[in-house]
Image (spheres, rainbow, N blue to C red):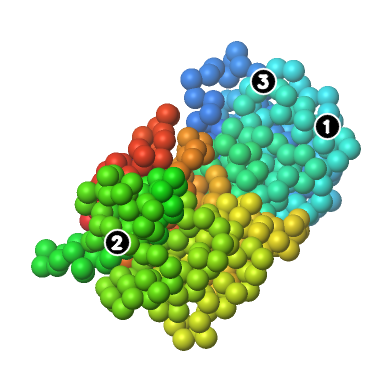
Amino acid sequence: MNEQQPTNPHELDLLTPDEMAEADRITIEGGFAGFSLMIEAGRGVADAALAMLKGLAPAVSGDVVCLAGPGKNGGDALVAAEFLRRAGWPVVVRQLGDPLSSGGDVAEAFRFYRGRSEPITSDLPQRVTLFIDGLFGAGLSRPIQGELAEIVEAVNKSSARILAIDLPSGICGRTGAVLGTAVKADRTVTFFRGKPGHLLDPGRSHCGVLDIVQIGIEDTVLQTIRPTCFRNGPALWNDVRRRPQASGHKYDRGHAVVFSGPAARTGAARLSASAALRAGAGLVTMFSPPSALLVNASHLTAIMLKRCEGAEDLFEHLKDDRLNAFVLGPGFGVGKAARQYAELVLGAGRLLVLDADGLTSFADDPNRLFAASRNGDREPRPRLVLTPHMGEFARLFPDLAEDTTLSKLEKTKHASERSGAIVVLKGADTVIASPDGRAAINDTGTPWLATAGTGDVLTGILAAQLAQRTPAFEAACMSVWMHSRAAELFGPGLIAEDLPGQLPTVLTELERLAT
């Protein structure tokens, strides 16, 4: 594994800034002093700073400069500065505003710190080894402008390393957006749980390595807060992942179907089908138009092949209720046939992953797709999974795509609620959302995934999990993670055909985590 994976699903909870403030409030009302939380937070920041300073000698290195804002982040910076001073490091605090006038825990933190403190200006020291950014936290709601923006830019241009407290100043904890300008940190220390802004771009790229430090807040506060957003990882879904049973047979593992496009566009569907078989489906069949039967037959071995020409053929095939999960879109073509096939599959109560051309085919009438997805709400669990990139998302949800007040997370959640489908909005920060309000943000993967055909592989992995009767939200989260992890294992030079071959190793890792 590229990192230690959490085993407790609650470790994957993501809290908005308001929810984190609620966790603080519940803890303090329960008898835990606010300054005690600040002491533990400052200690965690100091520990991270010492790790970044490891191997350097205080006597010959530059100063550690703590930038302390007027709020609790500034208090955390002051406490961290004192611990670093006691560890023998030359520390100076550059203070924004008067901490004593802030009162409460921040004023107490200022009295706790016994070192040098100066007003902050854009004229920063020249000999700095480490900046600790405690200017603004996740609750920032206004753009950083004027002299403060100059200070942030000066920090970013320096040769010193940068450690951010909670979030890099200028990053919105709710959306990950840059408010005016933002610190680009090498490392970020946050407390108790992560926030959406840590994982959503561009915030993700500003955070560097993310450390989550426990400061005395009990997990029981989550029973009151009831988070609905999570960092995607095995602890979220590995316990519901379907595994082959010793007494089982191939039909127990489901039968996935991938629709092929015409003769000159069959490759995308074969990528999906290959991934579905590798990802655990017991059987995979490709439904092919007559023009592509010979092309597909020359490439397929374990994957079965059936002729499917038009709605009448599909209607007959759907009489076999063992065919339980379908992929429609990769290389299929845009138009009436895609719309008819999607409606027939959903109308028959089957599970459908809709991607690429399948999505674009409903661009002129997305409500038609959403109505088919809900199918009179006769089935309480979603049967449709949409896997758009942002361009395809904009074709189905143009108003959401254009709304600059919404984060990627919020757009995906609104789209899922509107469509009645699981929505997987792809990208470096892929978001998965369910109509019941749950959502997950994926933070694994590699830039090498940005190549043709990798999305087709994802649809096949997803169809395999649905075919095995994994609940749709968990199936989507699992598939995104498996897809990203396979890419990490392969590394540079990745092309789509490489991904299915990495899936056995990914599944082995998941088995090890489950024991």
Contact flag, marks 1 and 2 (Cβ < 8 Å)? no
Q: Nearer the viewer, residue 431 or 132?
A: 431
Q: In the picture provided, is 142 more to the left or to the right than 72?
A: right
Check disc 2: other Cα within 10 Å, few if <14, some if 14-19, many if 20+: some
Q: Name the residue under label 3.
A: 159
For marks 1 and 3 on the same chain, the one whose residue lies earlier in the sequence: 1
Q: In which quarter of the image is the N terminus?
A: top left
- Amino acid identity at mark 2: Lys
- On residue 306, the disc is 2
40 or 359: which is nearer to us? Answer: 359
Nearer the observer: mark 1 or 2; the answer is 2
Q: What is the CA distance from the residue labelled 2 to the residue labelled 3?
A: 62 Å
Q: Which residue shows up at 40% across the image and 79% down it?
A: 348
In the figure, residue 160 lies in which quadrant?
Answer: top right
Count of numbered marks:
3
At label 3, counting other C-alpha atoms closer than 10 Å, the crowd grade (few under 14, some 14-19, many 20 or more) is: few
Left or right placement of residue 293 versus residue 54 in this view = left
Q: What element carries label 2?
A: strand
Q: Is mark 3 on a helix, strand or loop?
A: loop
Q: Distance between the residues labelled 1 and 2?
A: 65 Å
Q: Which residue is drawn at 39% across and 58% down?
A: 289
SS at circle 1: helix
Mark 1 and mark 2 lie on one chain; the one further toward the N terminus is 1
Residue 256: which quarter of the image? bottom left
Q: Which of 435 and 158 is in front in this view?
A: 435
Q: Residue 194: in sight, yes or no?
A: no
Tag 3 or tag 2, which sits nearer the N-term? Answer: 3
What is the x, y in percent for residue 434? 52, 69
Q: Name the residue under label 1.
A: 150
Q: Distance between the residues labelled 1 and 3?
A: 16 Å
Q: Where is residue 121 in the image (x, y as percent from the top left)?
A: 84, 31
